[in-house]
Amino acid sequence: MSQPIRNIAILAHVDAGKTTLSERILFAAGEVRRPGRVEDGLATMDYMPEEKERGITIESGVAHFEWKDSWFNFIDTPGHVDFGAEVDMALSAVEGAVLVVSAASGVETQTIAAFKKLREAGVRTILFVNKLDNPDYSLDDTLINIEEILGVRPVLMTLPQYENGRMTGVLDVLSQSRLTHSDTGEEVVDDGWNVDDGWDGSRELKQHYAEAVEFASNFDDEVLKLAMDGKRVPPKMLLRGLKALANSDDYALCYAGSAMEGFGVRSLVTALTFFLPDVPEFNEGELGQVIRLRHFKGVGEISLFRSHTDMERKAWPAGFEFSRLKANLLQPVDEIRAGDIYAMRTPFETELGQTIYLDERRVTRDERENTKNNEPGAPSLKPGASSPEPHASIRDKYQPLLQTRVECLGSEDYHHVEKSLNTLSRMDPSFRVQKDDGGFWYLHTVGEVQLDVLLARLKREFGCEVRAGSPEVRWQERLCRDVGPVENTFQLGPHKISIKLSATPLDSDAHDIRLSAEFLETAPREILAGVRSALLESTEVGILGKGALVGVCFEVHEFTWTEGALPSMIKKACADAVTKLIKPADVRLYEPIMELSLECPVNFAGLVTGDIQARDGKVKEIGGDGKTHFLKADVPLRKIFGYATGVRSISKGSALYSMKLLGYRPAAL
């Protein structure tokens, strides 16, 4: 029987201890000799220089390990809001996840966002309450916080133990045992401790076992019968009931401990083998799906790939290579297994979310041009109609809020920089590149951190020297009145294109394009697609150059063309028609408003609040527990550039904050 595969992700708010927990899991599994510390820049999963410098996870790192006869693919995801697209793509390839909650801070904004992502993706989730090495942090308060904010009943499966104010071990509810540290720092079962001998914590441990039985009885009739008869429910039967409970939206198995001190990790990883589902069944004829793209200096582009089939090296398609990816190291393999995750190199470019099929026919001419391979068994590059492309929905989900002008230092570097920027935009679906006819580009990013990292990677990974301007807020431009129709003609040599165009405003942020019945009936598909694409592309630039034009419906009344007209001519004719149709007076600017959530020691509350109000922020919620001050405010994005530096100075580095887009409002200019 083949080894069970468990694909898991780990998510959390920034500074909840997610990467530290990842390191401890690898240490417990014997993958590293000692767990690396994020503070020292030694975290195994954070291999990028930008990650080590900032102490945050940027790319979803992948590690592989074995535990109790199960094979794990372990993805450590970013916690910073600028890299939310990385989290979304990681969740498309896993069946289970660990959501880390800091006992120091409780459920925070990104905790809520991560939990929502997990629910939407249908990923089974186990909670880990971290930072309990500090006895001043309350486990009970954190559990109440989880139930109130996340709306699930946490079922506690480990309890921390303390001696003289120091954490010395954890009690495991399911096995009714105590785990402590060996001389080498590994977490081991304390053979000298027995729950029935009346040791410290025995009563509490039995109480939580009874609670677990009570909760599991809602999902297992045999457990319910024994519980109602007052008989003991054995651990194996309780395990079966908890497996059903773990799949419920009303409950969540919860493990408690300290990632920094290495307590509670062993019980957590064992739970991942018990309570997570097996990998699904895949369709026949599929090689697998691309879930991430990576670029390594000296290696080039690789695809993080989830296999949908079992296949030995001798049967691999020509030009394909598969490896294990451990941080940034590639370790070749001799076979691939369905459900497992590999690094894949191909003779062609792949796309995020793309399903690659094993097709026994010869490839078509278009595929041959892409693969440069016309042998039987070559993979088809076209995702089937039933195969979703996760990157498409992610591009729609993440709105770039900043735009930054970038240009080459030397004209001879132009094509290399353009190719590198396009590669980076393919790797990160929340980042977009807009080419300008003036020989430069606009980088559209979610936030400042993402921009800084992209520029650093452009130089380090691709060797591109560029000059970047200061980031500017990417506004929305909205059409505020009906315009047109206008006529525009573009001629190049014997070829001529004419278009008659009008536009009306929409109530939403959407775009709509209506084509005349005659045009629809007479134009070939490529002409229709070219017109739609050109008009949509023109909205990305906007009329004022401040941001995308949204809420507009274009109507093409007439469109004529000569045979042999090039796609570039269609693009030019449509772009000029839009410029001619919509004038600056026809649009109104809307600016992005951010929701800022912040917490800091109470002695800095006045300074922090005053600074937010000075940035035209509107405080809408204030709270705290006497030690920690919490607030939520709406702040214009243009007023909050460089906030990380400002709030760090005001609070002496003690404030934690996160931001998310609240919406757009008319700009007061």
Image (cartoon, grey):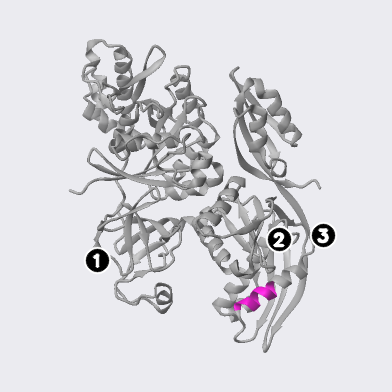
Query: Whole-Å distance between the Cαs marked 1 and 2?
Result: 51 Å
Mark linked to residue 542? 2
* Residue 220 appears anywhere in the view: no
The one nearer the camera, 572 or 122, is 572
**Above or below — where is 15 with respect to 209?**
below
Identify the element where label 3 is drawn: helix
Other-residue count near label 1 (Cα within 10 Å), few / some / many at <14 / 14–19 / ≥20: few
* Residue 108 appears anywhere in the view: yes
N-term mark: 1 or 3: 1
> Mark 3 highlights which residue?
585
Query: Whole-Å distance between the Cαs marked 1 and 3?
Result: 63 Å
Tell me whether circle 1 and circle 3 mark residues in contact (CB < 8 Å).
no
> Mark 1 highlights which residue?
315
The one nearer the camera, 488 or 14, is 14
Q: Mainly helix, strand or loop, the magenta region? A: helix
Name which residue type carries label 1.
Ala
Give the x, y percent position of residue 365. Answer: 41, 79
Residue occupying the point 45% across, 20% down: 134
Q: What stretch is highlighted in magenta?
A: 567-574
Name which residue type carries label 2.
Gly
N-term mark: 1 or 2: 1
Give the x, y percent position of residue 249. Answer: 41, 36
Identify the element where label 2 is drawn: loop
